[in-house]
Every structure is written in structure tokens, then in C-alpha cells.
Amino acid sequence: MENMVKVLREDAVQAESGEALQAAAAEKTAEKPPRSTVHRKRKFKPSRIAVYAFLIFWTLFLFLPVYALLVSSITPAEEASASSFTWFPKHPTLQPYADIFIHDPNLSKIGMPTLVYGFLNTMWITLVPVVVGLIVSGLSAYAYSKLDFPGRKIIFKIAFAVSMVPLGAFSVISYLFYDLLGWTNSALPLVIPGLFGSMNTVFFLKMYYETVPNEILEAARIDGKGTFGVFFSMLLPLAVPAFIAQFIFGFVGGYNSYMGPLLYLPQDDASTWTLQLALSKIVEIFPNDVNVRCASMLLGMVPLVVLYCFCQKLFIEGISVGGVKG
């Protein structure tokens, strides 16, 4: 009987302590406002409103030229030729986009519209040196960061110092050199130099490779991998985001290149023009059609926008891992 009384007393004490704990927790909860209330208070701070207002204004300001191109490209010819800018056409039309592909005078000469031919030329003139140059730059960065050979640091410093010289200083010399080789009036000066890589890419990848532990590479060598095997089986898969980031940089640079094609490609042969040359020639092909010219510019922007949308995550990751050492 006494044991039963003790058990009942212990249960009562535990129940009272549990109720006390629940009451204390309820008091603490009552003291703190709900999380949604805190966020609601933060959301309506004047400083936060000012920041969001500035960001919205800046975004609209940046996209204003794109909006002007879009509106002008769907504006009929009679409205586009007006003296004042039309913020939105009364009778929007897609005819300017059709004119690019149907009423191009070069269509009968080269078999396809100038813009399409320029895009195809840009693809192979840009992709070949960018892809091959990335592999060469990756191998060079691998040698500078992970291989031990005499004069490694001195050679890297000399190569980096030479890369700091602006390329514009060698434009005339480069043209005379390529003309001596007989490469002018062709795409060779635009393709061949890029096959040897870029020192900027080498420096970027070297910084990333130095974050990879040497023990991983030693384990691969123990498994029987050679120098190239370690690079292609270990370093290259680990550095995919960094390679993607450098690929986007190289591709955008080649895609937007205008001075090089203007110097080395024949200006009287539409079949050799790159996209930037083709866009500049659209002004001559459609001199009085502002809407057609705006439509061609928008079409020229589409590949870069699509590329960035698909590779945005890898691009940001590659920039972050390549720019931070350790």
C-alpha cells in the first residue's frame, strides 16, 4: 500500500513539473512575436523600400534599350519612319522578321539569308578555337600547378607579363605578319591563334587546380594513370564548372568580335561574313527599314541569352570556385 502511495506521489510531482515547463514555454512563445510578423515589419522599413525601388528603377533602365529594340522590330514601316518614338505600335507586326529571311538580296547569291550564313560562320570560327584552346589552356595550367619541372615559375611569370600587354598594340604588326603568310582574306588569323589557348584562361584554371589536393592525383598515379590520364580522368571532371565559365567568356568574346573579321575577311563575299559583319551589312541591305534592322539585332542576341540561361548555374559556380583559393 505504501509503495502505491509513493508511486502516485511521484506521478503527481512529474505532472506538476511538466505543467510548469509547458507554462514557461507558453510564456516565452507569447513574448516573441510570430515570425511572419517580424518579416512583415522588416518588409516595410523605409530603407528596404528605397533599396527595392532603386533596384526596380535600375532594372528598367537597363532593359530600356532592349524594349526599344523589341518595340521597333514589331512596328510597321510607316510608324517606324515617324519622327517620334512609338512606345507601343498601334498595329504590331512580325513582317520585319520575315523580311530578314525572305527579302534578303544575298539569298539568291549564297543560298541562304545573310544573317543565317553569318551565324553559321560565327559558330565554327568561334567554337573551334574556343574548345581546342580550352583543352590546351587546361593542360598548361595543369603543368604550371601540378608538374615539377625546371624554370616553371619563371616561365609562368614571363608568360603572364607578356599577356598584360594590350593586344591592340600588335594589330598592325599582326596584320603584316598574317599578310606575309598569305592568311589575309581568310578565317585563318581568326582560328589558328586561338588554338594555342589563352594566358588569362591558364591563370584562372591554375588558381583552381591549386585547390585540388595533390593526394588525389598521387592516388590516381598509383592506380596506373599517366600524366595525361590524371588530367583527363581527375582534374578535367573536377574542373567542369571552371571550364564552362571560361567557355562562356571565350564564346561571347568570339561571338561579338567585329574588328578581327573586319580586318581579315573579304568584305565583298557574303559567304565569309560572321554574324557581326552580317549585322553591320544589314544596314546597307535594308537602308530605309529601321524595324528590320532592329529585328536582326534582336535575333543576334538570342543565342547568347539562351546560352546563359542554360549555363547560368555552372557559370556562377565556375566563377566562384575559380576565383577563391584555398
Image (cartoon, rainbow, N blue to C red):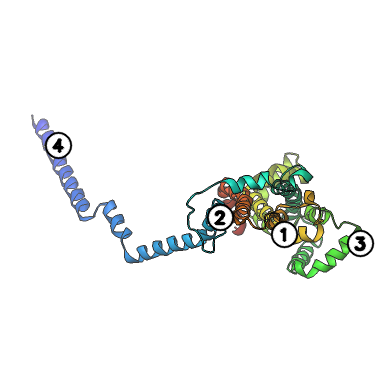
- N-terminal of the two: label 3 or label 4? 4
Q: Amino acid at mark 1?
A: Tyr
The spot of residue 276 in percent (x, y) is 70, 55
Which-is-in-front pick, marks 2 and 4? 2
The spot of residue 35 in percent (x, y) is 29, 52
Q: Which residue is mark 2?
A: 78
Q: Residue at the far top: name it.
A: 1
Which-is-in-front pick, marks 3 and 4? 3
- Please give the label number shown on residue 11: 4
Q: Amino acid at mark 4?
A: Asp
C-alpha separation, residue under disc 4 versus residue under disc 1 = 86 Å
Q: Residue at x 31, y 60 (%)?
A: 44
Quadrant assignment, res 193: bottom right
- N-terminal of the two: label 3 or label 1? 3
Q: Amino acid at mark 2?
A: Glu
- The quarter of the image holding the C terminus is bottom right
Q: Residue at x 81, y 58 (%)?
A: 264
- N-terminal of the two: label 4 or label 1? 4
Q: Which residue is mark 3?
A: 180
Disc 3 is placed on an element classified as helix
Question: Would residue 298 appear left or right of 155 to someone viewing this image?
Answer: left
Q: Nearer the viewer, residue 155 or 262?
A: 262
At label 3, counting other C-alpha atoms closer than 10 Å, the crowd grade (few under 14, some 14-19, many 20 or more) is few
Q: Which residue is mark 1?
A: 258
